[in-house]
Image (cartoon, coloured by chain):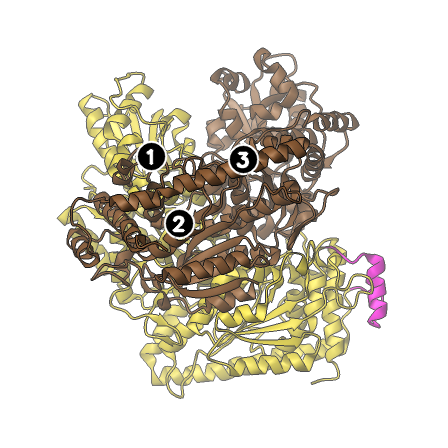
Chain colours: A yellow, B brown
Amino acid sequence: MSPLDPLCIDTIRMLSADAVQRARSGHPGMPMGAASMAYALWTRFLRHDPRHPDWPDRDRFLLSAGHGSMLLYSLLHLSGYELSRDEIRNFRQWGSRTPGHPEHGLTPGVEVTSGPLGQGFANGVGMAMAERFLAARFNRPGRTIVDHFTYAIVSDGDLMEGISHEAASLAGHLKLGKLIYLYDDNRITIEGATSLAWSDDTRRRFEAYGWHVQQVDGDDLEAVTGAIAHARETLDRPSLIAARTHIGHGSPNRQDSAKAHGEPLGEEELARTKQALGWPLEPAFHVPEEVRAHMGQAVARGEAWEHEWRAGLDAYARAFPADKAEWDLWMSRGLPEGWDEELRAEAEKIDAAGQPMATRAASGRALNLLARKVGNLVGGSADLGPSNNTTLTDHGDFLPGAVEGPNVHFGVREHAMAAAVNGMALHGGVRPYCGTFLVFSDYMRPSLRLAAMSHASGIFIFTHDSIGVGEDGPTHQPIEHLAALRAIPGLVVIRPADARETIEAWQVALRRGGPVALALSRQKLPSLQRTRVRLREETRQAADEAAVALGAYVLSEAAGEAPEVILIATGSEVARWVEAQGRLEAGRVATRVVSMPSWELFEEQPEAYRRFVLPKAVKVRLAVEAAAPFGWERYTLDPRAVIGMTRFGASAPGPVLFEKFGFTADAIAARALALLGRPLPDPQPPIGASR
Amino acid sequence: MSPLDPLCIDTIRMLSADAVQRARSGHPGMPMGAASMAYALWTRFLRHDPRHPDWPDRDRFLLSAGHGSMLLYSLLHLSGYELSRDEIRNFRQWGSRTPGHPEHGLTPGVEVTSGPLGQGFANGVGMAMAERFLAARFNRPGRTIVDHFTYAIVSDGDLMEGISHEAASLAGHLKLGKLIYLYDDNRITIEGATSLAWSDDTRRRFEAYGWHVQQVDGDDLEAVTGAIAHARETLDRPSLIAARTHIGHGSPNRQDSAKAHGEPLGEEELARTKQALGWPLEPAFHVPEEVRAHMGQAVARGEAWEHEWRAGLDAYARAFPADKAEWDLWMSRGLPEGWDEELRAEAEKIDAAGQPMATRAASGRALNLLARKVGNLVGGSADLGPSNNTTLTDHGDFLPGAVEGPNVHFGVREHAMAAAVNGMALHGGVRPYCGTFLVFSDYMRPSLRLAAMSHASGIFIFTHDSIGVGEDGPTHQPIEHLAALRAIPGLVVIRPADARETIEAWQVALRRGGPVALALSRQKLPSLQRTRVRLREETRQAADEAAVALGAYVLSEAAGEAPEVILIATGSEVARWVEAQGRLEAGRVATRVVSMPSWELFEEQPEAYRRFVLPKAVKVRLAVEAAAPFGWERYTLDPRAVIGMTRFGASAPGPVLFEKFGFTADAIAARALALLGRPLPDPQPPIGASR
């Protein structure tokens, strides 16, 4: 306890209010209300090193209530992070490191990008899971190198969102005792009092999840301190500390009102607040020297901690050099020597065998082969493990209170699963993945978006990727999902066409920084023999290794002459294209088939390569995908030249649906001929499925 | 209690198991396990009329665990709905009315499309809200015409999904006492025992939401009956009856195992099950005569109920003819005479005033004007009412336990909000709407998809529709969302360009069946004077009334000659296009500006009209939208001719962002000239934002 505590807390409040005022936009109320408890956490518990924000064993702090970003920026600034007073003054301005909501990668010390409610809450669960996995892998008796807490400040908005249920239920089930959340219980939301819309008994709710719940006065520094200490001792359950706070604390006319939430106090009210708190009216952004000195002790304290930890790591390295080497590899996101050798061999074997295989099955094989070499793959499915082929069969489970292996049972919780994967990825050290049906990617979109925005390298395995789902019907058949995923900037979507492409997709996914989504078939697909592949000299080697890495490639070149028609397809439709090529060539139409597993990877290629695959001269390009045709005109340059699904699917066996909806070699060939102006009668007109 | 009860229950079980076996796919375990409790509900409580499945005051029954569709089909078939034995035999086949998961609109008696977990759970909350709203509006002392329960069977999967938290919390808050859910507590999920992933104390959790919770043996018919009776008497809270059941009940080797969940029993095990239950091995789909007679009593019972209700309605009509007329109007989805007169007048007024206005503000005005005439608008926002302009300012709130008006405080629960809107829409009688930021449409996508699939006519108000959000930064700025919404078949997306287009969008939304999404600006937009509009003769009148209804129209025709360039834009970018037109015409480039508020509406127009707006002869068409360019090649036929956002946004004032990302009249004009092969120097190159 320091006599400076109240002054420090008021500094946080006033820095935040000043910054919002200067920006003429933002959220002053939350930082003012939560300043005390955040101060208690940051100065009395949080093990962090402002000069080494990447110290692997730091405690993680997440501001799930990201709209209160100025609270975090004030804490970072006052604790000695590389976040200057000018940055605080430039809050919410172009080019600043102090955006409206915290952005990971932009601001040192910001662990996750937050703001969309509930995301930080669930990211923290992933962080605690990563910590537990790494601790189980590396710690030895007397040689602990992984041992940190994950803290967050969460808001009523976070707790109202459904994802908080999924994440809290998962955390309670897994008994993540080193997860400690401070709930900023200010009882105000945008529309007014939380009681307008919310009557939950939050204590009871979290106890139902198996959490340890405490209730305190959030302005009582010692009470908050006691509660955090108690939470740290309660290692068999996650902890929620419900701290009663007052939004806009200190503002005479706005405290405890919805107006304090999302707009500046206004010059007058800001002045009144400063007067009420005994704060100098001028200058704005005032930081008393003694506050700077006091809170700046975080630097020395952090360096001592980090130094002590590093000494421990050195000792660990001497005792367990092989483990230390693996630690270094994992922490640097490296891959071990020969990590994909078995994958390549498998691809050859599958090619040689030529047996049909579902790409989800090939994915499961690839994942299991990878796991032999890459020890930090951690993941599972939202209760569809047997269908998604996500289980590492030679490995144990990530159990409540114990890590016997990397297999996580996420439960029917797609949203929290994705957000936890983001948390694991941003924690570092592990390579997380997860699975569900492609149609349920909708349940996790807010987290997929943040994965892309924060370059979190999770791998999202989406199986059952089309009407090939069959009898389960339209509720389970993705239509718009490929388009909707491709529209997200920075997300790489790969839809492989056979087992070999699937294996190559995994190679890409492991090498890549940032999130990758795989769209995989439920049904068996033929093995595409790459006998007529045509490669460009410069890309030959890359393509031999992994044609998928190019995004698109000439899978089967026109026989003899230059192509008149290019057939473009992805995934399960590629084989039909090759069949259609046969039909067309029998009718003397020189036809090239392009397999295009990934738009995003293709767009990254040099223009020369893109022109090689899709030469300008070939005007008739027909795309097929058993999905919404949305977006394909980018490559066909003709809306008529897309065969896709313009309606929802239906419940019937998959092969029936492909036939009824016009995905047959005959229908494709007929469409190509029509586009060439050489129509043939179409024996089976599709049922409103194509255009 | 009837001595036939056990036989009836076994009939449900065996019909379900036979159908799954014949289809060679499906979920036998749930129907077998839940047959007893479903039978108790359907034969002892459910007020329904198999011959009039649209009877407005019927009890609603929702199978949230939609994978158990054969349970519902068996009940419908045996109760005398128009669902024949052949349909049961054709389970999951092309063209049948018995798809893999229940589909509303396809099968009589199916209230909602379910299967994606958690959706039915939340739909039911909307149904109960609609019932309460209508009861408050129409019932009079001694003249009750609205008084029904909403029942559902929900599964562990439903309860694990986040949406169940949001919906249960909302239902508890609103004290929806006529909502009664049977929880099929079979403790098995796809990966195995629910305990693998789930440790919730469900009773405690639901009590925390303010629910009345009972626990019973789901196979004990009398216990279930008692619990339902008790739930019906508990009108101050929603009820959850946790019924312990056994998945695959009766199957000697599969009961209580995950294998019973999602695959046929197999011929052998099916035979063993029949033997164990004392059931004849042949024929399949056996329905004992006495069962058919007993369960078929539902028809007479239902007709009596419906008849009695109709007599009550007649008496009501005599006592309250005006109310009865409104009842008829609401039930037939009609609109009152002159419903949009004030809207039209407002559009004229706004046009004349020519003042800039945010389209969200115009939407709020439209909604409030509509509510003066259209009394069954019910809705609100997910805690963003003041921002979404969704509040009906002259009306009261939808309160816990009482309806003082139509304004719902949904809380920070986007997903449950959307699903509740679907439930209200499918209940009938009300016209539901809801609002949030466009970026958070991601949180509700599974429900938006089901709205489209089941033609549920909710109106989704998405404000803050671009980087115009400004300082809140990339987490709050939609980029991919317009594309992702447009990709959903059957969802109409409208992004109006000014106040007048916004008003017209509301006219379209009210007239339309099926869901409509409005994308609205946060920032003020200039009023587009339609002085240079060019209309086609046939569409002149329609366009005069509501150009938006055409999806796209020539807002500002090229001066003098035929256009060389067409500039296409939506929403906030249209005004910039008109500015750019001025620049281009100053440089003697004949330029047409097309406002395209809705792709879907445009695609519905006759080809002649589409060609009129976008003539083939004009090859240079430049589209601009402050969103992902994804899909725009459909209209530009050139990937270079789209100015959009290929990255996430940034935190800065909105006008700065529009400038930095290249959405300026100068940049647009320069791009158009470049496409024409008449390049001008671009004074401010955009920052990787366009392509």
Mark 1 or mark 3, whichever is nearer to me: 3
> Where is mark 1, residue-wise?
A612
Q: Which chain carries label 3?
A: B
Most foreground residue, A53 or B170: B170
Q: In this view, does A256 lie to the left or right of A446?
A: right
* Label 1: how many Cα within 10 Å (few below 14, some 14–19, many 20+): some
Residue B675 coordinates in the image, percent (x, y): 53, 26
Secondary element type, mark 3: helix
Q: Which chain carries label 2?
A: B
Q: Residue A637 in magenta?
A: no
Check residue B43 in the rendering and tell me which mark sits there, or answer none: 2
Callout 1–callout 3 Cβ contact below 8 Å = no
Residue A586 coordinates in the image, percent (x, y): 17, 23
Mark 2 or mark 1, whichever is nearer to me: 2
Please, which residue is most extreme toward the bottom here? A142
* Span shown in magenta: A263-284
Above or below, A210 against A263 in this view is: below
Do marks 1 and 3 both belong to one polypeptide chain? no
Above or below, A359 against B328 in this view is: below
Identify residue type, mark 3: Arg
Most foreground residue, A644 or A570: A644
Identify residue type, mark 1: Phe
Check residue B310 in the rendering and tell me which mark sits there, or answer none: 3
Question: Which of the image's four quarters has the N terminus of chain B?
Answer: bottom left
Q: Can residue A580 be seen in this view?
A: yes
Q: Residue A279 in magenta?
A: yes
* Label 2: how many Cα within 10 Å (few below 14, some 14–19, many 20+): some
Disc tally is 3
Residue shown at 61% from the left, 44% from the top:
B135
Label 2 or label 3, whichever comes before in sequence order = 2
Secondary element type, mark 2: helix
